[in-house]
Every structure is written in C-alpha cells, then in structure tokens.
Amino acid sequence: MLPVTDRSLPSRIWRASLFGLAVVVLAVHVFGGWHFSGEIIDRVFTPEATAPEPPDSWMFSTPQEAGLEAMEIRYDTPIGPMDAWVTDGTRSEWVIHVHGKGGGRGEALRSMVFLDEAGYHQMAISYRNDPGQPADPSGQHRFGVTEREDLAAAVEYARSQGATEIVLYGYSTGAAISMAYAIRQPIGSIAAMVIDSPNLDLEETVDFGSSQEDLPVLGLPVPFTVTATAKFFAALRTDVNWRSFDYLERTDALSMPVLTLHGTDDQTVPLEISSQRADLRSDLVRFIPVEGAGHVESYNDDPASYQQAVLDFLAG
C-alpha cells in the first residue's frame, strides 16, 4: 500500500515561513527603531557639551577676524543672561542673527560684514543650550518652542537701544526659532525675515537624514517604516510632539516679507521645505535656490549674488 501524502505539509511550511518573516520584520522595526531613536535623540535633541569647531564655510570665528567692531554684551532672558555680539550702525534698523543648532554666533559673521557696511545695527545672539549658556529646563533642544523666548528678549534689548525696525536673520534651526517667534507677533512688529537653509519641519528633516542611513548589521537602506518607528520611540523617550516643530503648518500666520536662500545640494535640510513654503505664501516669500550649494553655504557659493539678494530685499 502506498503511503498517504500529507497534502497540508506545504501549507504548514508556507505559514511557518510567513510567521518567521513576520518575526524578522517585527524585530527589524523594534530593534532598528529603538536604535535609531537613540541616534535621533543624540543628534537632534541632546545639547552639545562643547562649542563646535567652526567649519571653513563660516570664514570667520570672531568679529575681530571679520574686521568688525563688536561689543560683547549679555542680555536678560527668562532663564538667565545670554551672550551676544552687538555692532553699531548708522541706521535705526537692527538685524538680529540667530544661528543654527550646534553652531554658534560665528555662523552669522559672513553676513554681518556686508550688513555692517550697509549701516545696519546688528546683534548675533547665543541662546539656551549653547555651550556656556543657561540650559533649557527640559535639558533638550526644542527647535523654537522655548528658544523663541530668548529671541523675544533679544528683540526687547534691541528696542531698548533705539531700534525702530527689527529684521530677523535665521540660519538652519535659527530660522525655526525666528519663525516660532515671528508668527506670534502683531502685524508690523517684525519688518522682515531672512532665512538661510531653514529647518522649518524637523520631522521632514529627520526623514531626509534617515533616508541616507543604513540599517546596522544588515547594511540595507533604512525603510521609512523603521524611521517612523524610531520617531515614535524618540517622541516617547523625550516627551515631544513632532507637530510642534512643523512651522510649514503655520505659514499662514506670516505677516512680514521673507527672503529664503537654500542650496540645492543641502544634505541636511531638504530643499523641498523651502520650496513648499514659498508656494504656500508666494505673496510674502521670495525663494532663491542656490545651485550646487550645501547646507548654509549659499553665501560661499556666490558671495556677490548672495549679498545683493539680501540687500535688495531689505531695501525693498
């Protein structure tokens, strides 16, 4: 008698294979998500312990190197005094520079040189969590949610010194801080805003960065589902709401003209953030993509064109 074939065996093997695959996929998402949530926390939310080494793109690290006569002052904020550089000008307008996360006041010096020549008073501020400055009570970077209070204090300082008009000049995350402050101000309170490589949607920036990473051990590109899991874990571990860092959502609250400069080869903040914002508020936002420039390097790519764009915008 011939043996009876177990016709259910292939289906059991198939089900076991599917179960095994599901376990692997779940493990990749849980362990990969947890791993990358730690990287997100370290890279995005954790303050830097020491001041960064100024990159070559900054060109200068001190006002003296840039040929500027600047006063080192301290301005009062809700959590304590902060350092700032202040330069005198012949005009009544003040430009307040807000550097990016992990940067420093030196990031603004390239622009401060030609704005000084144009006669603007200027103030380049430090803010909470910068090395040597008071820490945010949360112990984390908050991308404008709390840092805007420091910018508000800087604006009040400028006004106490006779400023009649305020221009905000934000670099990378400094643009987010500027935006977080500006959208809460009455119409006419801020005359204009210049933003360079603006990090106006932190979640989109994290997605962009993760797309350039590989999974540990496997060496495969990080799937967007793993990134989503990592962001979920990071939000739980830091008690943040990603939407609170999305300033594109609040573009309708803009009430002042904005000049946006953004390099097309920016590998830190996606160019689409700037183009989306320009599309949403074409009545107020002028967008200049700078071909081939990297993150906050549009000035370096073509200094003359950059300077002229900023000066023409402010003159208009």
Image (cartoon, rainbow, N blue to C red):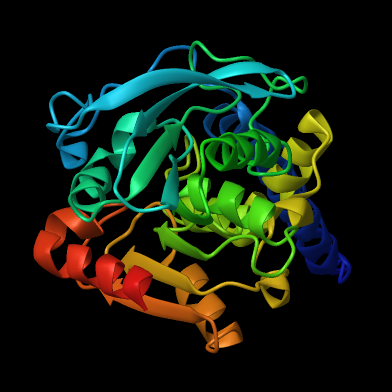
Horizontal placement of 65 versus 92: left or right? Answer: left
Q: To which quarter of the image does residue 40 belong?
A: top right
- For residue 153, say whether it is visible: yes
The residue positioned 56% from the left and 56% from the top of the image is: 207
Residue 73 versus residue 168: which sits nearer the camera? 73
Q: Is residue 241 above or below residue 87?
A: below
Name the image quarter holding the C terminus.
Answer: bottom left
Res. 292 image quadrant: bottom left
Tell me where residue 288 appears, x and y as whole percent: 32, 76
- Which quarter shows the N terminus? bottom right
Where's residue 86, x and y in %?
38, 31
Identified at 55% across, 76% down, the residue is: 277
The percent position of residue 146, horizontal first and vertical second, equals 72, 36
User: Count of labels shown?
Assistant: 0
Res. 264 visible in picture: no
Please tell me whether residue 276 is drawn above or below residue 132 in the rendered image: below
In the image, residue 261 above or below residue 226: below
Asked whether, in this view, residue 84 is left or right of residue 18, the answer is left
